[in-house]
Image (spheres, grey):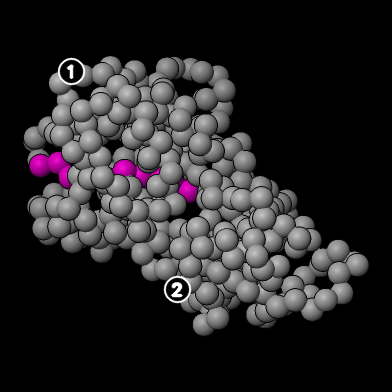
Amino acid sequence: MRKHLHTAILVIGSALAALAQGTSSFPAYVAKENLQGTLRLKGSDSIDPLVRLWIQEFQKVQPDVQFTVESHGSATAPAALLKQESEIGHMSRAMNETELGAFQTRFGHAPIGVTVAYDALAIYVNRKNPIKRLSVQQLDAIYGSTRMTGAEKSLDGWWQLPLQKHLVQRYWVRPYGRDENSGSRAFFMEKILQKGGKLKDGVRIKDQMGIMEVIGRDINAIGYGPESYRNPMVRMVPLVGLKSEQAYLPTMENIQSGKYALARTLYLYTNRETDKPLPPAVQAFFEFVLSGKGQDLAKGYGSAPLTPEIAKTELAKVL
C-alpha cells in the first residue's frame, strides 16, 4: 500500500501539464441532505490550517456535521486511528511500514490513504540573514552528524558560507527542527539527512509556530516548515537539490514540476471495514476535499492541487 500511496508524488511533473490543459473536470460535490454526526480528526500540525479551511467551507453546505481537530504531528494520526479515537487522520507523510503493520494486525485490513494535495517544506532564516541560497548538502552539514549526502565537514557557522561581502561578523548557525511525532521532521530527515542519517545533538526542537517565532527573533537561526507559517520576520531561502545546480523556491509551479527538492504529498487516512461503506459524513468530507471546490481551497491556501485525473482516482478509494 505504501508503494501505491507514493505513486502520487511521481506524477507531479505531469500534473502541471494536465492542469494547464484542463483535459477533464474535477469531481463535483453534491451536498447530501440530513447529514449529521461528529468527525474527529487527529494528525499533522503542518497541514492543520488547510484541514480547518476545508472543514469551515464544508460546514457551510453541511452545517449539522460537527468536527473536533487535534494536530500534534503526523505520528499521532495512525495511533488515533488504531485506538479508534478519530475517524480521519491528516498526515504530511505516508504511513510507514510499522504503522501499516500495526493497523493490519489490529483490524485485519489496511487503512485507506487518500492523496489530497501537495505542498513543500520551505527553508527559513531571519529576514536580515543575507544568505542567497543553500544546497541539500549544506543543510545536511548544518543539521546532520553523519553527512550522508557527501558534505566534507560540519557546517557550524554562517561565516563558512558565501554571504554578502560587507558582513564580517562570525555568526554561529542555530538549527531548529521538529519533534519525533512530526511528519515534517520525518520528511526532512529522509530528504536532507538521507535514510540512516542522524541529527546533531545541538538541533533545537520546537513546534512549527515556535520555530517561526524564534527565527524571526534570532539572526543565527534556521528552520523548516510549510509556507503557510511564514511571517514578516523570516524569509525563504532558495534550495539546490542533490542533482541540480539551480536553486528553487517552493512556488506552486516548482512543487508541481518536481524542481523543488522538498516537495511532498499530503494525505487523509481513514478506517473502513472490508466490503462496508464509509459512514456518510466521512465519505462526504472526502468527496468535498477532492472536488473542484476543495482543490481550489488547497490552491488558495498555498498548496499545489491535484489534477482532475488524480482527484478522481483518489475519490474512487472511498466510494
Q: In which quarter of the image is residue 157?
A: bottom right
Query: In the image, what residue type sits under mark 2?
Result: Gly
So how many labels did they put on this image?
2
Q: Quadrant of residue 54?
A: top left
- Label 2: few (<14), some (14–19) or many (≥20) C-alpha neighbours in 10 Å: few
According to the image, label 1 marks what residue? Answer: 33
What element does badge 2 sit on? loop
* Residue situated in front as seen by the camera: 22 or 199: 199
Counting other residues with Cα less than 10 Å from the Cα at mark 1, is it few (<14), some (14-19), or many (20 or more)?
few
Give the residue drawn at x 9%, y 52%. 108
- Picture coordinates of residue 47 (x, y %)? 42, 47
Magenta stretch: give its range.
264-273
Type of residue at label 1? Answer: Glu
Q: Is residue 228 above or below residue 305?
A: below
* Image quadrant in which you'd find residue 39: top left
Q: For the point 51% across and 32% down, which residue is it?
A: 299
Earlier in the chain: of badge 1 and badge 2, it is: 1
In the rendered image, residue 238, in percent from the top left (x then y), is placed at: 69, 53
Give the secondary structure at mark 1. loop
